[in-house]
Image (cartoon, rainbow, N blue to C red):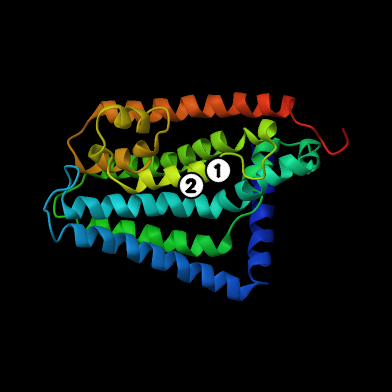
Amino acid sequence: MIRYIKLYLYCLRFSFSKAMEFRIDFFFRIFMDILFYFINFLFYFVIFKHTQILGGWTIDQIFIFVSSFLVIDAINMTVFANNLWYLPEFIVRGDLDYYLVRPVSSLFMLSVRDFAANSFINLIIAFSLLIWAIIRYPSNLSLFSIVIFFLLIITGAILRYFVRMMFIIPTFWLHSNRGFEMIFFQMNRFIERPDRIYTGFMRIILTTVLPFGVMASFPTRFLVDDFNLNILFHFITITIIFFLFIKWFWQKGLKGYSSASS
């Protein structure tokens, strides 16, 4: 474990040094994410001009929800996005060889080697928005609920990584530069809406098989709704299942991998 921490710290130092070499891109991406945050808040602000409740939540609760999925998105953009974008190309071109021969987990290196320093600034901004939404919330929130809430936000970001990997790993058999990622990006929009606006079969899918409705909605529900242990249990269970599935699926993919030397 210590070896992996030291390795990741080296990756962080290299990533920040590289980001400073392309300062226009660095600040442009910060600006684009800030615009994305503004549009999301504006979207719900306009909706609440015409209604007082959406998915069972008031505007104050929605602000916590919006800030939650912005933090989850920022975590993924900071930690995983740059790495996963190139992963399908590594698989198709055979560049995966360079990572398979290293004395560390290939999945670890391929997932976190490139830390997006510019997105880290946006993560701070998104986190600040979340703190603002919690502070302005009109009802008292217990310290216990807030702590568990933040842990669930981190878990939601990890779960999103697992789901994206589920769409990338089929590249081992498809030999496509993007795998099913375009489908993932389209479905990722579901995380931006409260889970209770979906009903019936769609809701079952979005809280189990493709748990986009869990990632940000369940942490928010745990914080602002009445205490519900089932929410916590469901969230943790889904995350553990996806963790075990991705480990198995990755190994299965490696068995079907054609290296550059084969």
Q: Which residue extends farthest bottom?
A: 24
Q: Nearer the viewer, residue 226 or 3?
A: 226
Q: Residues within 10 Å of mark 1 (few under 14, many from 20)?
A: many
Residue at (63% x, 56% y) in the render: 12
Pointer 1 residue: 181
Pointer 2 residue: 185
- Figure check: 238 above or below 224: above
Residue at (61% x, 49% y) in the render: 85
Element type where label 1 sits in the image: helix
Q: Amino acid at mark 2?
A: Phe
- Figure check: 186 above or below 50: above
Q: Quadrant of the N terminus?
A: top right
- Figure check: 113 above or below 1: below
Q: Position of residue 50 (x, y in %)?
A: 12, 58
Q: Is residue 258 visible?
A: yes
Q: CA distance from mark 1 to mark 2?
A: 6 Å
Element type where label 2 sits in the image: helix
Residue at (27% x, 52% y) in the render: 64
Q: Amino acid at mark 1?
A: Glu
Residue 11's tag is none
Answer whether labels 1 and 2 touch (C-beta < 8 Å).
yes
Residue at (49% x, 64% y) in the render: 121
Q: Position of residue 109 (x, y in %)?
A: 68, 43
From the viewer's perspective, tell me whether residue 138 is left or right of residue 123. Answer: left
Q: Position of residue 88 (x, y in %)?
A: 67, 43
Q: Position of residue 220 (x, y in %)?
A: 28, 43
